[in-house]
Amino acid sequence: MPPTVVLLGPPGSGKGTQAEQLRELGFATLSTGDLLRAAREANTELGRRAAEYMDRGDLVPDELIDAMLAEELEGRDDEAVLLDGFPRTVAQADALNDVLGELGRELDHAVLVEVPDDVVAERIGNRGQGRADDDPETVRERLRVYHEQTEPLVEYYEDRGLLRRVDGEGDVDSVQSAIRAAIE
Ligand code: ADP
């Protein structure tokens, strides 16, 4: 089976940008944030249910996300897959293991893009791309949720020997090189 890689890191750590560039290596990149925003745009049932959580900076319930991911992973047996923004809870990580197992895949690497909170807040404050959840109060909530619900995955993947730490504070190209070196 082709490789499966997870990108972990706080909001504003640049995961999306890095994931985009990793497509060059042949990865199909699945970003849960992008998928959810597309679902909202298309006004699907999922999009409507996800909206209230996203606007508060909270996580969309696991069952909605797990179903969305399982659907996206189907039919990709020949593709290397990179997950951006999933899993975000230990329950999602367990669900991912199950889905991958059913598909005959397994996770190869969990790459943690490390960026301190003050840098995150500054970056998001500067990007001004008008995402509704980028106002300072919602960013604080997203960071709080990250530390509380997503950070336990660092230990989770460390225990399984899958964690690769990358310094996310450098420029885009050096972070990209570090990620490529980590998953080589
Ligand atoms: P960021 O990483 O900058 O917070 P994303 O685009 O990855 O932004 O996610 C935006 C929002 O989408 C999150 O704040 C959350 O509400 C929702 N979301 C994305 N991925 C997940 C997930 N795996 N589980 C639950 N909610 C999610």
Image (tube, helix red, strand yellow):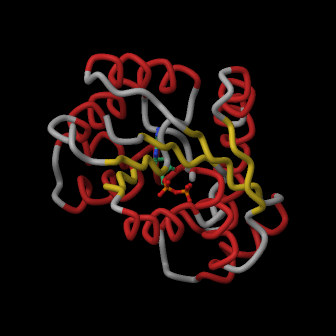
Q: Position of residue 118 (x, y in %)?
A: 84, 65
Which residue is found at the position 83% from the left and 59% from the top? 116
Q: Where is residue 6 in the image (x, y as percent from the top left)?
A: 51, 43
Against 116, is 164 above or below?
above
Q: Which of 94 and 182 is in front in this view?
A: 182
Which residue is found at the position 72% from the left and 34% from the top? 154
Q: Nearer the viewer, residue 47 or 19?
A: 19
Q: Is residue 147 left or right of residue 95?
A: right
Q: In which quarter of the image is the N terminus?
A: top left
Which residue is found at the position 48% from the left and 67% from the top? 132
Q: Where is residue 103 in the image (x, y as percent from the top left)?
A: 26, 24
Against 112, is 12 above or below?
below
Q: Is residue 55 left or right of residue 13?
A: left
Q: Which residue lies furthest to the front in this view?
A: 184
Q: In this view, does 115 lie to the left or right of 161?
A: right
Quadrant in the rendering for residue 128: bottom right
Against 34, is 143 above or below?
above
Quadrant in the rendering for residue 41: bottom left
Q: Which of 134 and 166 is in front in this view?
A: 166
Q: Position of residue 78 (x, y in %)?
A: 21, 43
Against 163, is 119 above or below?
below
